[in-house]
Amino acid sequence: MDKLFSQNLHNLRSVNIVVIVLASVWSFFPVFIEKNLPKAGIYLITALVSLVIVFITNYEIKRTRLGMDVTRKLTYILMTLYYSNVMFFGMYIGVWSNPEIFAVSFMSFLICALFLLINSPVYNLCLTLGALVIFIVSTVSFKSQQIWTFDLSNVLIAGCISLFFSWHITKLRLISALNTATLEDERNKYFNQSTIDELTGLRNRRDFMQTFHRYVSYYRSSDDWLCIAIADIDFFKNYNDYYGHPKGDECLRSVGNLLNSLRSVMSVYAARVGGEEFALLWFENKVEHVNTVVSGIFNLVRNLDILHEKSEASPHVTLSIGICVMRCGSFHDTHALYDSADKALYMAKKSGRNCAYINGRDIAQYKICGE
C-alpha cells in the first residue's frame, strides 16, 4: 500500500504544478483586462496553496527515496487540500464571481479533479458529495432561480458522471496497483530466499560475493580503509559431535544473530559463507579502529556464554578471525583480498584460536587475543 501512497505523491506534485501554472496565468486577466485586483488575488492564493502542496510532496518523495515510510495521514490531508483548493477555485469562477452565468467551469473541475489520484472509492465519494452539497448551497444562495435550476440539474449529472468514472477508474487502478505490489512482494520474497541463510538469518555466500564486489568498487570519499574478516567457530565439529546437531544449529543461530546485530551497532555487514564460517565487511576511517570492532566482537561472543566443554581454546564458544585491511581504491581483486583474510584466519587457528590476526599491504601483521 505504501507504493499507492507514493504514486499519489507523484501525481499530486504533477497536478498541483498544472494548477499553479493555470491559476498564475489566469491572474493576469483580472489585473490587465478587468482591473480587478481582488479576483487576481484569489487566483494567486489558489496558486500559492498548490505551491505549498508541491513543496510538501517533494519533501515526502525525497523521504521515500531514502527508504522511509510514506506518511499516509499526511498524504490524505494533501489530497483533500488539493481537491478543496481546486473545488473552491472552480466555485469562485462558476458561482461567486459570476453568479449570472452557468457553472460549466465548476463542473469540469468537479469531474476531472480526482482522476489522477488513486484513492479508495469511498474517499472519492465523500469528496464528490461534499463538493456537490457546497455547490448546491452556494448556487441557491447566490444565483437567480432561472440559472440555479439549470445549474443544479447539470451539476447532478456531472456528479453522477464523476462518481461513475472515478469509481471504476479508481477500482481498476487499485486492482492494478495491488497486483503490482503483490508481484513485487513475491519477487522480494524469492530474492530474499535466494540471498538469506535460512538457519541464521544472515546473508548467504551469494549475497556476500555481490556485496563484496560492490564494497570494493563503490565507496564514499570519507572511507579510507576496507576491512574483510573471515570468522570461524572454534572446534565446532567437536561441539556438534558432543552436544548433537540440534544444539549445533542453536549455536549457529546465536552467533548469527550476534553478527547480524553488528550492522546497527558497528555498521558491519555479516554473512554466513560456510558451515561454521562467517564473513564480515566494513569501512574504517582510521586503521586503529579495526581493533575496536574486533574486541567488540570477542566481548559479544563471550557474553553469549555458550558452554563448549570440548573446546581446546576456552570453556565456552569462541571465534578465530582473520582480517585483511586495505586502502579503499588501492586493490580490486576480491579473490586476493578474500585469500588474504583466509590466510590470516589460518594464522589465528595455528596460534591457538580464540584470537584474530590482522594483515594488509600497508600495515604490519599483528594479533588480538580474545580473552
Image (cartoon, rainbow, N blue to C red):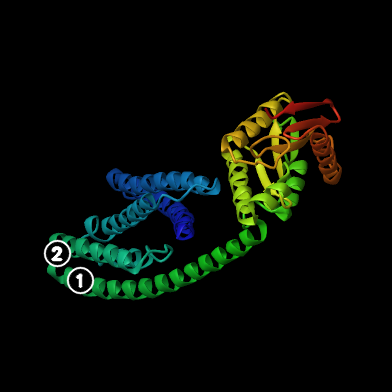
Instruction: In this rendered view, identify the residue nearer to me: 71 or 35.
Output: 71
Q: Residues within 10 Å of mark 2 (few under 14, many from 20)?
A: some
258 lies left or right of 218: left
Which residue is pictured at 84% across the width and 34% down the height?
330
Can residue 167 be spotted in the picture? yes
Alpha carbon separation for disc pair 1 and 2: 9 Å
Tell me which amino acid carries mark 1.
Leu
Q: Which residue is mark 1?
A: 152
Where residue 42 sits in the image (x, y, percent)?
30, 47
Q: Secondary structure at mark 2?
A: helix
Can residue 220 be spotted in the picture? no
Kindly indicate the quadrant of the structure image that contains residue 199: bottom right
Q: Secondary structure at mark 1?
A: helix
Where residue 159 sits in the image (x, y, percent)?
28, 71
Instruction: In this rendered view, identify the residue nearer to me: 328 or 355.
Output: 355
89 lies left or right of 282: left
Tell me which amino acid carries mark 2.
Val
Which residue is pictured at 23% across the width and 60% down the height?
95
Q: Which residue is mark 2?
A: 140
Mark 1 or mark 2: name the one nearer the start of the chain.
Answer: 2
Instruction: In this rendered view, identify the residue nearer to me: 195 or 329.
Output: 195
The vertical placement of 158 against 269, above or below, is below
Where residue 354 sits in the image (x, y, percent)?
72, 34
Which residue is pictured at 18% across the width and 63% down the height?
139
Q: Answer yes or no: do the residues labelled 1 and 2 have beta carbons within 8 Å?
A: yes
The vertical placement of 336 against 104, above or below, is above
